[in-house]
Image: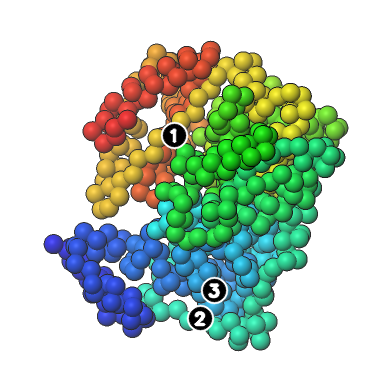
Amino acid sequence: MLSKEVAARYQAWLAAPFLAAADRAELAALTDEAEITDRFYCDLEFGTGGMRGELGIGTNRMNIYLIRRLTQALADTVIEHGGAARGVAISYDSRRFSREFAQAAAGVLNANGVKAYLFSELAPTPVLSFAVRHTHAMAGIMVTASHNPKQYNGYKVYWEDGGQLPPEQADKIVAKMAGRNSWEVAEMPPEQAKAQGLLEMLGGSLHDAYTAKVKEQLLNAELCAAKGGEMNIVYTPLSGTGRKPVERILREIGFQNLHTVAAQAEPDPEFATVAVPNPEDAGAWALSEQLAAEIEQQTGENVDLLLATDPDADRLGVCCRLPGGGYQRLSGNQVGVLLAYYIINREREMGILPENALVVKSVVSTALANRVVQALGVNIKDVPVGFKYIGEQIKLLEEAGREREFLFGFEESLGYLKGTYARDKDAVLAAALTAEAALYWRGQGKTLPDVLAGLYQEFGCYLDAQVACSFPGIDGREQMREILRTLTEDRRDKLGGLNVASREYYAQGEQLAGGEMQPLDFPRVDMLGLTFEGGGGFIKVRPSGTEPKIRFYFCISGADEAAAKDNLQAVQQEFFRPVSSYIKL
């Protein structure tokens, strides 16, 4: 039976004058009370930089009505900051309703007298971040659900520095949405907006400027121009936004033997060729490996690299050919370490490494990066999860006149950025950097896995693993609270044979070390942590800001791969024991 609150919300939407006839019919046809409850038991939350959720009609779904309401709150915030004339840049990916949501957002902004810079065709997230800075806009909107399944869409908000929305502005938007009772929001027709100078379309010249900035970050232009054609690369945009910019940058810098997976080359909102359009998913690589095998059979030449970008092209996946055939998929942590190692060494060779160079990574990304970067004499800083925190560090350096010191930023979820032209992770740049690094080491008789093996030999083998557990529906929230409560109260001093050096309670700004609670020098975020002695690694527990999930990040080391695997398995089994009724490995 529906609760009174859910029933009232459902009936209010059925009777709402703002609802289109087809949407009213969709709601009226619902007979499953569990489905009605899931759609209306809450409002979809504004999380880490925006909103993401399943498409559909209801308060807990992504739909045109939520887009309008959210954009009205953003318009109010932009106006409050005196940014109406500066405007808002808007882009979108290949998902269902992405174009329509982007156009509706522009219409709402225009109806409020706020200028909109709307991309004339779909474009990646990093290009949107660049566009905010390039147009000097006050804010930006990216309509995307990134790498999520096809039934999802989302809405990410950026601020004037090109980074994802800071907490102060995010809180204002949330407050303005909460204070608005009506779901009826006006839009201005695009023809009227253009006539009034409130709508400007972005296209070719913006992409040219972006490509030029990406090229400025590369470190081996002559080598790529001379030898890039010797390397075979297979690339897939996974039916998203990456094809044009990735093909362009790779070919222009010298990688002419670039082969794009035809079945995944064009935008497809159904993502018909994959279960999940995520380079972290092994199934996303099937067609790339098939194409690579065909090329090798037809030409007799090896395909050196497989590259994949997610639908909004902010994440890059990398696979490398093995000497005996087949491919090794590199994790985001492994690629992040390799790129940091390459950039530091190459800039030092060129004599351009800044004296106080800084690498920034998310706190859940591998501890191997800290060891490698510090051994090379470069500073490294851990920040909360979310690339906006890496962008925040760039902004702080910029404000101090030390912008050039930012060398590289990465997070384990396949996100990388070199330079400051954008403030979000960029798979287009990462594809070019990875190809360039692979070509550089190829000249030394090494593959990317060879270089990684050398780092393991020097610093120890670090294995990084993530366990993501979903808790959907109205009962899921209570289950998540119970798991977090249990793990917060856990005080065991040894797991899997490894001694616990400290426990970090990030939300409270405290850590338990040496039997005493001490201040924790880290931003207060909703996360738990545990650090092992002697550089043995860590565990981090983080509830998602945009999905009903808890993510568990494990970074465990060993003298070699076999030892690290044994340690990881033992640690995971013991760590999850207190919550085994909710989480099964």
- Where is mark 3, residue-wise? 103
Q: Amino acid at mark 3?
A: Gln
> SS of the residue at dot 1?
strand
Q: Quadrant of the N terminus?
A: bottom left
- Where is mark 1, residue-wise? 466
Residue beneath the point at 72% across and 37% down? 231
Front-lying residue, 365 or 528:
365
> SS of the residue at dot 2?
loop
Inter-mark Cα distance, 1 to 2: 43 Å
- Where is mark 2, residue-wise? 187
Q: Are marks 2 and 3 in contact (CB under 8 Å)?
A: no
Q: Quadrant of the C terminus?
A: top left
Residue beneath the point at 54% across and 78% down? 107
> SS of the residue at dot 3?
helix
Is 132 drawn above or below residue 329 in the view shown? below
Residue 540: name its quadrant. top left
Residue beneath the point at 33% across and 78% down? 22
